[in-house]
Image (tube, coloured by chain):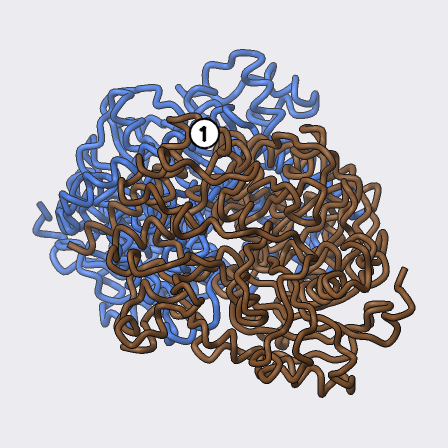
Chain colours: A brown, B blue
Amino acid sequence: MPTTSSRDRCTVGVDFGTLSGRAVVVRVRDGAELGTAVHPYRHGVMDRTLAATGKPLPPDWALQHPSDYVEVLGRAVPDAIAASGVDPQDVIGIATDFTACTVLPVLADGTPLCLLAEYAGEPHAYVKLWKHHAAQAHADRITAAAHARQEKWIGRYGGRISAEWEFAKALQLLEEAPALYARMSQWVEAADWIVWQLCGRYVRSSCTAGYKGIYQDGTYPSENFLGALNPDFAGFARDKLADPTGNLGEVAGGLTPQAAAWTGLPAGIAVAVGNVDAHVTAPAANAVRPGQLVAIMGTSTCHVMNGDVLAEVPGMCGVVDGGIVPGLWGYEAGQSGVGDIFGWYVDNGVPPSYVDAAGGDVHAYLSTLAAGQPVGQHGLVALDWLNGNRSVLVDHELSGVVVGLTLDTRPEDVYRALVEATAFGTRTIVEAFDAAGVPVQEFVVAGGLVKNRYVMQTYADVLQRPISAIASDQGPALGSAIHAAVAAGAYPDVTAAAAAMGQKEAAAFVPNAAHASAYNALYAEYVLLHDYFGRGGNDVLHRLRGLRRGAGAGARQ
Amino acid sequence: MPTTSSRDRCTVGVDFGTLSGRAVVVRVRDGAELGTAVHPYRHGVMDRTLAATGKPLPPDWALQHPSDYVEVLGRAVPDAIAASGVDPQDVIGIATDFTACTVLPVLADGTPLCLLAEYAGEPHAYVKLWKHHAAQAHADRITAAAHARQEKWIGRYGGRISAEWEFAKALQLLEEAPALYARMSQWVEAADWIVWQLCGRYVRSSCTAGYKGIYQDGTYPSENFLGALNPDFAGFARDKLADPTGNLGEVAGGLTPQAAAWTGLPAGIAVAVGNVDAHVTAPAANAVRPGQLVAIMGTSTCHVMNGDVLAEVPGMCGVVDGGIVPGLWGYEAGQSGVGDIFGWYVDNGVPPSYVDAAGGDVHAYLSTLAAGQPVGQHGLVALDWLNGNRSVLVDHELSGVVVGLTLDTRPEDVYRALVEATAFGTRTIVEAFDAAGVPVQEFVVAGGLVKNRYVMQTYADVLQRPISAIASDQGPALGSAIHAAVAAGAYPDVTAAAAAMGQKEAAAFVPNAAHASAYNALYAEYVLLHDYFGRGGNDVLHRLRGLRRGAGAGARQ
């Protein structure tokens, strides 16, 4: 319950996305969103050339410029305050969430190396965005060594360390730019760096440390392990990573005068420990109790769920003590392509006649056509691995399959099959949690795809359970504002704040019993193909990937 | 060698296709095509409604009007003669070829039942076009009964009697319109009916009798067998089918005065025994020797090849004594979707940006983009069963599969994978012939797809052998003109006439050795998936077809 002192007080949540940052001003007593503003990153995603030099970047690179984040503080926050009509003096705290693992090398005072004149032309000095995928070889070495040495932490990550995470990206940095690696004082998540800018203190978030930094049971991978990867890497965790961590919802510090000047907020107000966009969404949907799985559905889907026990769920992305809220085990799973798959199809597979008939919204048009079909009428089943499989197979080298095409197959049929495939993928994740003893008791959706009622209804039918939907359409920013309220002392903990400020519509989508039953047959086909193509029955997807690389290599010669 | 008397003499070949008829005037001594004309069928294909009544037809029906064929004789033939500048008195023979099995019920004098006023509104009284597929259930019963009774002829048809053929369509007629069946004197292939119109005599072509009429070793299926299907069907072959057959290239009769009036040709000239469009193409390419496989590549592909021995080639469509030229075993195989698959993709899977960039010819644009890729770069492999598999699995209920899709997959990648899939399908057929002891010694292509050099080059690379190409772009009509020359006595047999009048470019497409070798890896993947999805490893394609039917039935309720 809100305390008397919190009435009419507000907090600010800032969500740092891939292309822009969004600030929202939220009333502490009930979570009402009073004003919002978005500011795009000046440099966007640098994945072709480095802005400072115009020089091309290698394939699979994705960089950002840290000044863009500070600019969001100086533009989006004041704009949101202005839009809300709130007196800045009524703002009692600020919190942020970020994409992750998005990480940068800094000096001891937090200065990004890319801001030093000597490194402005060095790509490795910039922020490596979550989707920088050029450290795959380094990740593979880490995974292989972990299994070879039977490191106990590898099981907490579904048996695989991602190329996106801190260690893989740092190992790439060491081996490709050793002088810069040596100059780097700390290897900092952007989620923590922005908090550092706000409060002047470096506090590692327990969320990013756990999910992206292999921080388990109070320790990092050993020097012995790291030295085996590369002798010069032995001290990495101790020297560049191991700073104090803070729990989610805790105060990292007070807003500095400089940050107060940027944002227009009062100096000294609470700045919360940093957080990750997916994880921070759970309280925004008031879904932080054990068994409440929140699926943040956008270009990809991230599933976060609290559990009161530690279980080994096969193929999860990670399980972290306090990873979502302090005191519970935070489970994370994911599907690496969802909205991206639908978007790919709309961009690459829909003919002009449909685009013309759609009149602007091809997704809506295809969804309407697809929604009218009886289950199974299209005669198709697909595997949703066009961007690999993050859970439960944890295999980025898999690819998509469409089965059952005929000369009668129409675009809405393929679209429907792709939507269903992602729903089947979700069902395998839910069933994995159920089977591992951390059952999913409520399925809650958030993210941009919630607006597509056809997609949501399909998920309800395929999952054969009601689906709750977050009430806010800016879940991460609201989730951050909730953390700000906790950090400011307005609520005793995140769970209490979520109950007052977060909101969801329970059972917003209810399965059609006949459709749900009919989907069992299609799901059985999905599972059969899933195991055949994904568990070694036919390793063709890996061989095709290999042929593709070989052909590419041949073509470059 | 042409005889002296044949110099400057000409023949006329008429090719009756699915939508129009084409006549060509050909010089007998060297096969030069002197003039041609096309006339479309007034009624086209009736697959939605019956023209006479406007009433809807059931699904899978496809009818034609026999008067349209006569109109072709009266329009296309005189137009071709006029275009050629030839004196009609120099024409010494005429021959025809037809789609098959395209079949109609007639009175004893050859009058189609649909021309009787009382039957003008009865769909069963019309010509059932080859692609009338509403007799599938009847075909399935025939196939099942043949296996149950171990009929020896079933092996000559790859173990399966098609829904397109004479017996299935006749059984449907009997059971759905018994009075009309009783009134019918003969069940006549359009290939033979048009010859009947030209010369006044009904002579069954040994080609259609063998491939479509289950006429083997001089007999039809027994009364006992037919009576087991339906007691009223026992006398079908004896009463409605068993008329004298004629060999290909033989004279069926002389041109009647009425047909002379229609065509403007001299009465009394030789009219050859009827033929089928695919089979008649072999002599037009001068490819009638044992081991010369002619692939007529269009919407689908038909493969015809002579052999000097009778072999059981698994999954062939049929083997008929004298089915292509008298004295040799004529083998037929096929792929039920080829150009149709490419067309389906262009119509249903190519986005506006590509269509715009293509500037009119999307096939050419995609072919150019696809041709530039190294083998395997797209990371895809597909199964070419979007219209079922005619050979070597002989399973119309199979469907297409695409494996290896990623968010980077572009339309030219899928197009290339589909082209390759049809080439892989061809390779399975060639390998089946080779393995059965009737080796393919030369692969010759004809048909509309020959013009696509990218497709042809892919076939050469995948088949790892040179491909010869027919010189004429109106192969069937030229093939008919060759038969007319034989019937008129200008050559002693079809083989001699083909040598003088037919023409191909040997090794028009030569495999790129590196590509051919690289394709082995992709072909191995195709074979693995082919057997998994096609030979019972995973019967998902049949189950999906069943779900589709069930969903359709549910939707109609």
Residue on which the image places disc 1: A151
Residue A169: x percent and y percent? 38, 52
Looking at the rendering, which quadrant does residue A491 occupy? bottom right
Question: Height in image: B69 above or below A235?
Answer: below
Question: Height in image: B439 above or below B517?
Answer: above
In the image shown, does B475 or A463 lie closer to the viewer? A463
- In the displayed orientation, state which residue is furthest to the top: B149
Residue in view at x 74 percent, y 36 percent: A308
Q: Say whether residue B334 is left or right of residue A205.
A: left
Total labels drawn: 1
Looking at the rendering, which quadrant does residue B87 occupy? bottom left
The subunit carrying tag 1 is A
Q: Say whether residue A499 is left or right of residue B1.
A: right
Can you say which quadrant of the picture contains the C terminus of chain A?
A: bottom left
Residue in view at x 31 percent, y 59 percent: A59
Residue in view at x 53 percent, y 44 percent: A390
Residue in view at x 26 percent, y 55 percent: B373
What's the amino acid at mark 1? Glu
Question: Height in image: A94 above or below A556?
Answer: below
In the image shown, does A82 or A468 lie closer to the viewer? A82
Visible residue check, residue A296:
yes
What secondary structure is marked by label 1?
Answer: loop
Looking at the rendering, which quadrant does residue B177 occupy? top right
